[in-house]
Image (spheres, helix red, strand yellow):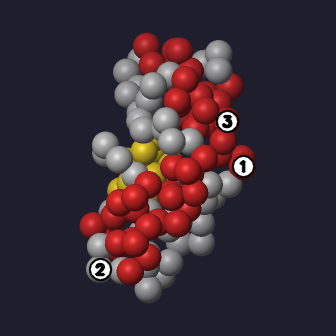
Amino acid sequence: MLIRAIASGGRAALCIEQGMVGLKLWTGTFCDEPCVYPVIEAAIELELPIMVHTFHKVVSPIRYESKPINVVNLARRYPEAKLIMAHWAGMAQRREGRRALPEHLHGY
């Protein structure tokens, strides 16, 4: 519901007035899918940080959980986005996480 509100524009101001300070993208789809772009663009316009739920699970993976490469793709497309990558430390030992992120993510 919150994502629909932010993407629809008109209700985004109401969400902010009621105390919204950022967005969390969980596992409904990968963070770099085109259907997410309007949400990212609205967050950029409103100067809201976006926390992306990420992890690499060996046991019981969640189908659409973003991986480091998905966040990198999003950061490349939207370098002005304030991205926060949750659980990255859980992937620090993974080559994919170590290689991909430092070059492309900054600040959060």
Tag 2 near tag 3, CB within 8 Å: no
> Disc 2 to disc 3, how far (Cα)?
33 Å
Residue 65 percent coordinates (x, y)? 53, 66
Kind of residue indicated by mark 2:
Gln
Disc 3 designates what residue?
A: 38
89 with respect to 56 (left or right): left
Q: Looking at this view, is 60 or 73 the one in front? A: 73
Q: Disc number at residue 93?
A: 2
Which residue corresponds to the image point at 42% horizontal and 45% vertical from the top-left?
Answer: 83
Residue 88 percent coordinates (x, y)? 33, 64
Name the quarter where the C terminus is drawn: top left
Which residue corresponds to the image point at 40% horizontal and 58% vertical from the top-left?
Answer: 103
Secondary structure under tag 1 reads: helix
Secondary structure under tag 2 reads: loop
Residue 12 percent coordinates (x, y)? 56, 21
Up/down of 63 relative to 18, above or below:
below
Kind of residue indicated by mark 1:
Pro
Secondary structure under tag 3 reads: helix
| Dot 1 alpha-carbon crowd within 10 angstroms: few under 14, some 14 to 19, many 20 or more | few
Which residue corresponds to the image point at 43% horizontal and 76% vertical from the top-left?
Answer: 96
Up/down of 54 relative to 23, above or below:
below
Q: Looking at this view, is 14 or 102 the one in front? A: 102
Q: Earlier in the sequence, mark 2 or mark 3?
A: 3
Tag 2 near tag 1, CB within 8 Å: no
Disc 1 designates what residue?
A: 34
Q: Quadrant of residue 98?
A: bottom left
| Dot 3 alpha-carbon crowd within 10 angstroms: few under 14, some 14 to 19, many 20 or more | some
In the current view of this chain or complex, which residue is farthest to the right? Answer: 34
